[in-house]
Amino acid sequence: MKKISLVLSLVIIMTILCACSEPYSQVRGNDAVAVASEASVSEKISGCNPEKYTMDLTLDTEKDTISGDVIVDLTNMTDDALTKICFRLYSATVSSGSINKAENTSTGTEYEVAPGSDKSVIYVDLAGDSIDPGKTVSVKLNFTSIIPDSEDRFGVINTDNGKLYNMTFCFPQIAFLENGKWFEDAYIPEGEARFSEMSDYYVTLKAPADYTVVSSGKSSTTDGVTTIDAPGVREMAIAACNFADVISKTEDGIKYNVLAVKFSDDNAEYYTDMYNIMLDAAIDSVNIFSELVGNYIYDEIDIVPLYMSGNIGGMEMPGFIQIAVPKNVTASDEGYSEVDYTGICQNTMIVTAHEMGHQWFYCAVGNNEAADPWLDESFTSFLEYYYVYKSDKLEDTADAFNKKHYEIDPQEIPSAFDSEDGSSPSYVNLPTNDYGKDGDYSLVVYDNGAWFLRKLELTMGSEKFFEMLSEWYTLNTGKIAGGAVFVQHVLKYDSSDEVKDVINYFLSDDYLK
């Protein structure tokens, strides 16, 4: 996710980073290197592994609900019999959602469903059907999620032209089971609290025939029935709209799709241009990030433009991103300054690059987003900065767009990497809930976190740094990584005192495991 304003974030980033307060100042004696080096770490594998999800869903556009049956094939990876299974249904926290029924698909045994520590935590009691170590069972859930009226990552946007449904955070998933403890952290609006293994999703969605559907994985629709095949994803995301087409481009075997929502009949050309800019930025990002880090793991990406409330610029899911667009802004509208206009196209491209970066960090290389948000947001912000630094299309595209639609020249986009300064004394590896006042989370995890990686690059040298980062990506794609493992990985490439100083400056030894 990327939180921004319409004013181009990179215009002010250097000032903010150099002048910010010190809410999490370094503690004398902090030794993250020593703690990480001595940590006994093992690969994070959930004790209850979801082999696959088979979903039969119905979108009710009258009641604004998504509901249906989800069959989960799950395996007990622990040494003990499992008597309960914990599921997460984040819609229960965001709006309203419930698992109405659970049963064993083989025996028909119905299981008791009970709430956990948070509304989104739901336990299924297996009664006498405990799962022995190494055994696989199939559990069928019937669920309902109410889709809120919301201009956000999960919700329905109602317009004069129709409805746009964003169905994320609304499907039941097995919670992560680590060291005998189920992951029960609450949904965090400021960030995310997702923590799940990859699995294969096979979905059938019934919706009114006039709705266009895009999703994680590959989808096809006939007479209102959409089938989705999404192998190797951490979650399912679906968008459906009855006033949209799909604009597509294919490059190097990857298909890029934009759900071309017709927000305005009067300004259709404006939005069409914006959607093509999203496509170009996505393609540009994949080319740059593939060269820097490694290949994109999927062969398709769907982009959903939407209004977003709460100053949120975008959101990522596997093979699926959401990008905020302005509400029909024109040059004559009051309340918009020139800097807002010059930033609209630039912001769109940069946010697209940021969310595309999450396809590498979060979607491919997973992490516990509640405990270690820096392992995806800091890495993705670093890639975002590099997109600005390396893109040949950004300036020219923004110049053409703004001159066409606003009749003004855009501001020059500064690169955060033009300077070797820009960090503040604030640890970047705290859990999301441990950041204090409003804005601290975004400032520290996104911006200072990106500068942590930049400092490593400057200290190690670019060639060695990107060799390290590329191998980190290769070794951990499809897995879930932790902070201590990353520090150990860096030290394999460079264990100099200078690199250790950078690590100790940015990472707290209290939160490395």
Image (cartoon, grey):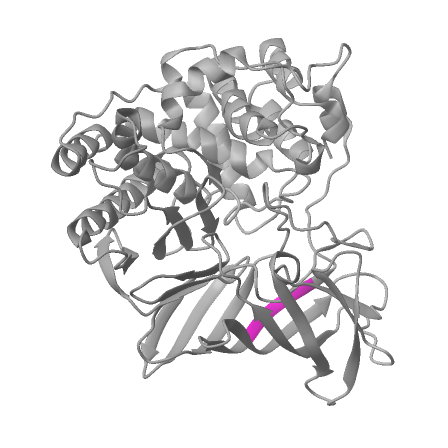
| 89 vs 202, nearest the viewer | 89
Q: Is residue 94 above or below residue 226?
A: above
Question: Taking 433 as reference, is 76 above or below it?
Answer: below
Residue 67, percent from left and from top: 56, 76
Q: Nearer the viewer, residue 262 or 358?
A: 262
Residue 144, position in %: x, y?
Answer: 60, 74
Q: Quadrant of residue 98?
A: bottom right
Q: Residue at x 68, y 85 (%)?
A: 105
58 on left or right of 329: right
**Is there any visible trace of residue 359 in the rendered image?**
no
Which image quadrant for residue 112? bottom right
In the rendering, at what x and y percent does residue 22 appear? Answer: 64, 15
Quarter of the rendering occupied by the C terminus: top right
User: In the rendered structure, does residue 51 fall within the stretch colored magenta?
Assistant: yes
Total number of numbered discs in the rendering: 0
Q: Quadrant of residue 142?
A: bottom right
**Residue 96 pos. (x, y %):** 63, 65
Residue sitting at the far front? 334
Q: Is residue 138 found inside the magenta-colored segment of the image? A: no
Q: Viewed as shown, does residue 448 lie left or right of 335? A: right
Asked if residue 458 shows in the view, the reply is yes
Magenta span main SS: strand
Q: Which residues are magenta?
A: 49-54
Q: Nearer the viewer, residue 238 or 325?
A: 325
Q: Is residue 276 left or right of residue 178?
A: left
The residue drawn where x is 70% and y is 88% is 106
